[in-house]
Amino acid sequence: MLTQEKKQYNWKPIIRAFEAVVGKNAVVQRREELITYECDGLTSYRQRPAVVLLPRTTEQIAELVKICNKYSLSFIPRGSGTGLSGGALPLENSVLIVTSLMRQILDVDLDNQHIVVQPGVINSWVTQTVSGAGFYYAPDPSSQIICSIGGNVAENSGGVHCLKYGVTTNHVLGLKIVTPEGKILDLGGQVPEMPGYDLTGVFVGSEGTLGIATEITLRILKSAESICVLLADFASVEAAGASVSDIISAGIIPGGMEMMDNISINAVEDVVATNCYPRDAQAILLVEIDGLEVEVQVNKQRVAEICQQNGARNVTSASDPETRLKLWKGRKAAFAAAGHLSPDYYVQDGVIPRTQLPYVLQEIEALSQKFGYKIANVFHAGDGNLHPLILFDNAVPGALEKVEEVGGEILKLCVKVGGSISGEHGIGADKKCYMPDMFSDADLESMQWIRQVFNPKGLANPEKIFPTPRTCGEAANTNMKKFAGVEQF
Amino acid sequence: MLTQEKKQYNWKPIIRAFEAVVGKNAVVQRREELITYECDGLTSYRQRPAVVLLPRTTEQIAELVKICNKYSLSFIPRGSGTGLSGGALPLENSVLIVTSLMRQILDVDLDNQHIVVQPGVINSWVTQTVSGAGFYYAPDPSSQIICSIGGNVAENSGGVHCLKYGVTTNHVLGLKIVTPEGKILDLGGQVPEMPGYDLTGVFVGSEGTLGIATEITLRILKSAESICVLLADFASVEAAGASVSDIISAGIIPGGMEMMDNISINAVEDVVATNCYPRDAQAILLVEIDGLEVEVQVNKQRVAEICQQNGARNVTSASDPETRLKLWKGRKAAFAAAGHLSPDYYVQDGVIPRTQLPYVLQEIEALSQKFGYKIANVFHAGDGNLHPLILFDNAVPGALEKVEEVGGEILKLCVKVGGSISGEHGIGADKKCYMPDMFSDADLESMQWIRQVFNPKGLANPEKIFPTPRTCGEAANTNMKKFAGVEQF
């Protein structure tokens, strides 16, 4: 368990203060109710918070944060809790501020193409709200039917369509936030590129360490006239990888370009039976082309030809919404399907320059052989964002540690080829010990400057993002490692 | 003149220290040579620096900055000096660090679509370097044949093509910087969306207040297969404005969409004689469509129809490079041409939500009538980025102050309708007194936190961006106003 400095809290007056702000029903204290909040999507680490708060307004959050400051209590912001890097993992004696009751769409301005939402609004609701008028919200994490916009902002979430349209930070125009000291600030606005320092950009991806976003102005896009999905199957992963490079080199930017390897294909067919993915393919590519009808027709042809030139055994395509959905269904279910291959899996998230794809996939295979764990590969191929799924059994003593080691090796490989240790899942509690592999001491120190000025008491989501101590090896004797002792429930 | 706290400097040992780093030839002290550096593109304010330094490497800049720290000397970074908000305006007794000798292209990686350049590299050189291989660099300020990438980064410059492709910050992947204390840091990297706080985003647009970028990794894009420019002429500004809204509403995102009013049209025809722009048009729209040939054909047709539906008198188009260049020539020369209409002009830069275009143009006309100054309008219509050019004669006592008042009224109008006081020229020395119109005290204070941690002694480009004191009115009795006393040379 992550542990704050041992300290006795007299909870009674604190709880009374919280209740005075949000009401008794919005202060959760009962053990069985708190269990839900012990972890986020990174389920292998758990810690029960002292109390969970469910505010409804910006002003309530500001008041709650002030109370945390008064009593020097750590607070951890949480949306839907679907994050995969432990960004919403509680500390002992910490307060969870959960935005699940803040689910109002505050404003829709179709003419100027933006929408203002509360942080608890579910990602897919944004598109649902504006789709009738021919608009959509681009960032689409696999968890989009349950993850919240506040969480997306905290983790700078990506998704299938981020290849062409960019991740969350490219779609946030403005934010109202409550700072770690309880001040209410407005960052950015309703037009892009406001003057002064880009604090909106700093806040997006800050994983709750710089405060809590309470109103979010999102850019919405006009839906494309036509969309087509191609499915190409390959006898080798290398051939699929080469096709990805060639498609981009040809100047085509697909709406999305995803790759799945043989293990993932079979897992998906076992579980959701799309009956579209050939079980003997070593890799499939799913390429979505969007734009004008004429443009889609031309690019569809070009993509198919490139895949065939790289030895694709078969290329099919679908333009009607139903078949497109069917082709995507397997990809969207890939993580869940991996859960059927083995008792547990560990999903990694790293980025590499696209041209390094064949080399890195070979090296991942070598790590799989060396450590004796099967690794399924599902990823945003177009932007080099890998998601290796390491399959293991957490009931085997020491397995989690071994798997984390494999995950760490994969991240180091990403850094070695000029990539990054996170594409879209954030650093959270899970990967902070790899930050020094990517950044120098001076670089990390400059990020800490930002944290310290926003969060001088360190109460907002402590022990996340930044490594203390410096390396994973050193971490073995500290709090960081302690919470690998999984608390069962 | 802006004045630092009055202080006597013993320049001899300082100059010797500078010379030890960069050599005698790279330390400029002679009065007649310093004149060049008295102002940037905002020529109405001037101040001679004490010394100008011309380093060639990151390490030299770090050493120079350390010397400035040792002697508590303010330093002002400067690229080509084409900025329009006085971002590179010297202070008395300040040191100018000019990057004009840092003009190397350090790396070109076409496969991964990025290029690494020194800050003095001229904007248009980037495209020239990669165009043979079918790539280009998107941000294209009108000054692109002379402005430097370092200056573009400092001011987060835009340009005609930023409607579709985004401003400078969307194209900077990574930066090597020298901090205001002389540390060398690496921000970002070679893949987009690195973990940790987005310090690259904070640095871009920080106008030299957070340090000096010494190596810049830029994203390059694949050139479009086909490009077409349409010229539509209108009997009213409102009809042109309505066309802009309708084009965007139709889901078309032109590569660029520019509007010029009657005054600008005639100025341009007088000076560069494109013979393309009808002198009796109240407004023209230049719309550039890029993409696949088939896509361009369809969108060209749709844009023409939309313009005609809004009453365009004539719509012509050109796809061959020579005629396209001719159509753009007038727009690119518009600022220079305004110089022929009156002895002086003051160019404003504000942003409005696109839907407010007709209203704001009417209000600008009303201001023109009220104050008795002609105002020419040339602007990036697609993204609501206005560039009113207020024509005046600086030899008339008090005219500059009056014109600044008009400019201020225009900015307040932009803020009132939900826009911004700067689209792409930065705040610099010129607009800092309008920051409180746009940001609350708390918002401005949070920006100051960033400045203070990066720039604790305040030596890097002081008295820029942030208002001291708070309002333009109050400023009348301070240093800020003093430098309105134009020093002739």
Image: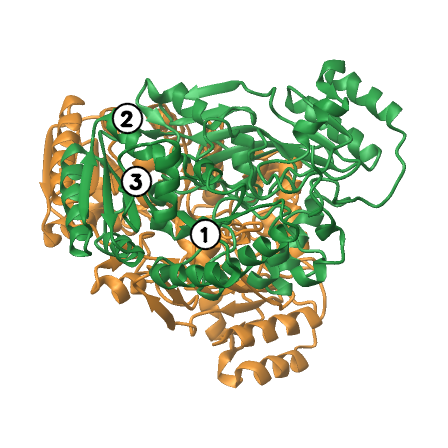
Chain colours: A orange, B green
Identify the image quadrant of residue B229.
top left
Report x, y in % for residue A139.
34, 52
Q: Is residue A352 left or right of residue B407?
A: left
Pointer 3 chain: B
Badge 3 density bin: few <14, some 14–19, many ≥20, Cα 10 Å:
many
Residue mark closest to the camera, 2 vs 3: 3
Along the line of sight, which residue is nearer the eye, B208 or B144? B144
Do the residues at discs 1 and 3 belong to one chain?
yes
Q: Amino acid at mark 3?
A: Gly
Q: Are marks 1 and 2 in contact (CB under 8 Å)?
A: no
User: What SS does tag 3 mark?
Assistant: loop
Pointer 2 chain: A
Q: Amino acid at mark 2?
A: Ser
The answer to whether any part of residue A286 appears in the image is yes
Residue mark closest to the camera, 1 vs 3: 1
Labelled disc at residue B189: none
Pointer 1 chain: B
Q: CA distance from mark 1 to mark 2?
A: 46 Å
Report x, y in % for residue B183.
70, 32
Badge 1 density bin: few <14, some 14–19, many ≥20, Cα 10 Å:
many
Q: Is residue B392 left or right of residue B337?
A: right
Q: Are marks 1 and 3 in contact (CB under 8 Å)?
A: no
Give the mark, 1 or 3, whose residue is nearer the N terminus: 3
